Amino acid sequence: MNNIFQSHLLIKKGDIAPYVLLPGDPGRIKRIVRFWDSGKEVKYNREFLTWTGTYKGIPISATSTGIGCPSAAIAVEELTNAGAEIFIRIGTCGALKKEIRPGNLILPDSALRQDGTTKEYVVPDFVAQASPEVFKALSDAAQSLGMVFFSGINRTHDAFYETTENFLSLMQTEEYKKGRLVSSEMECSSVFTVASLRGKKSGAVLAVNTAEPLEDIAKDPDLIYRLETTPDADKGIDDSIRVALRAIELLEKRKQ
């Protein structure tokens, strides 16, 4: 299986570096590779665009996952088969606390699994966690770069256009009541879960592109669809890339 082309990414062993960045949007791949020393396109099929190159001499790949957990899980499975070892999701999210603003970064240490995909893999009480060493590297990287960031639990779900009842239910969770729920997006739980099951490491750095307190969203769900296109929100995307790349440097140094 490892020596054949993977069914959806159309990659094979030797195409992929140990470190892989996972944006959702294929259009973000070229934004990522601008920071690399060198790189080339490996394959583009469906929502999956893959590049491989180097960053400060470190072999690195990037693959877009599209929107949602099903395609993100496929990407992690097939990248693992092709030789990937460490995954860092680079994405956007909605912040759920009033102190978090567009352009800030979220470093989730775990994901609340409100998606359907991970239910196909694990029991309900399985905790989808970022790997501690990857989370620490991301935190250290963000601090060293002077980024404004927040850590906590990210909620992963399936329906971008969801109901008010979903938000009211979310407010009843222990994660929210304990003040640990910081953001919401659509891929992290599958990345964390599948990587863990396959013996790989993972983490995520998310740029905030909409920021409304959960209690306000529960009253007016349309608030989450007002995505910010401000300079701060756009800069957050580049900041998330810088943090991920710096974290890879730290992880590489800590191996030595």
Image (tube, rainbow, N blue to C red):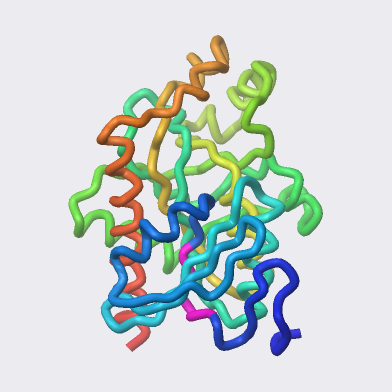
Residue ranking furthest to the top:
219
Q: Which residue is found at the position 53% from the left and 79% from the top?
A: 16
Q: Which residues are magenta?
A: 16-21
Q: Position of residue 28 (x, y in %)?
A: 43, 53
* 17 falls in the magenta region: yes
Q: Position of residue 181 (x, y in %)?
A: 50, 35
- Residue 143 picture quarter: bottom left
Above or below 108: residue 78: below
- Residue 71 picture quarter: bottom right
Above or below 37: residue 174: above
The image shows a total of numbered marks equal to: 0
Q: Which residue is found at the position 59% from the left and 32% from the top?
A: 174
Q: Which residue is found at the position 77% from the left and 57% from the top?
A: 122
Above or below 94: residue 116: below
The C terminus lies in which quarter of the figure? bottom left
- Indicate left or right for 74 with 86 as reference: right
Q: Which residue is found at the position 30% from the left and 81% from the top?
A: 253
Q: Nearer the viewer, residue 54 or 128?
A: 54
Above or below 129: residue 104: above
- Residue 158 picture quarter: top right
Q: Position of residue 61 (x, y in %)?
A: 46, 73
* 169 falls in the magenta region: no
Q: Nearer the viewer, residue 92 or 26?
A: 26
- Indicate left or right for 158 with 106 as reference: right
- Indicate left or right for 213 with 186 as reference: left
The N terminus lies in which quarter of the figure? bottom right
Q: Position of residue 17 (x, y in %)?
A: 48, 80
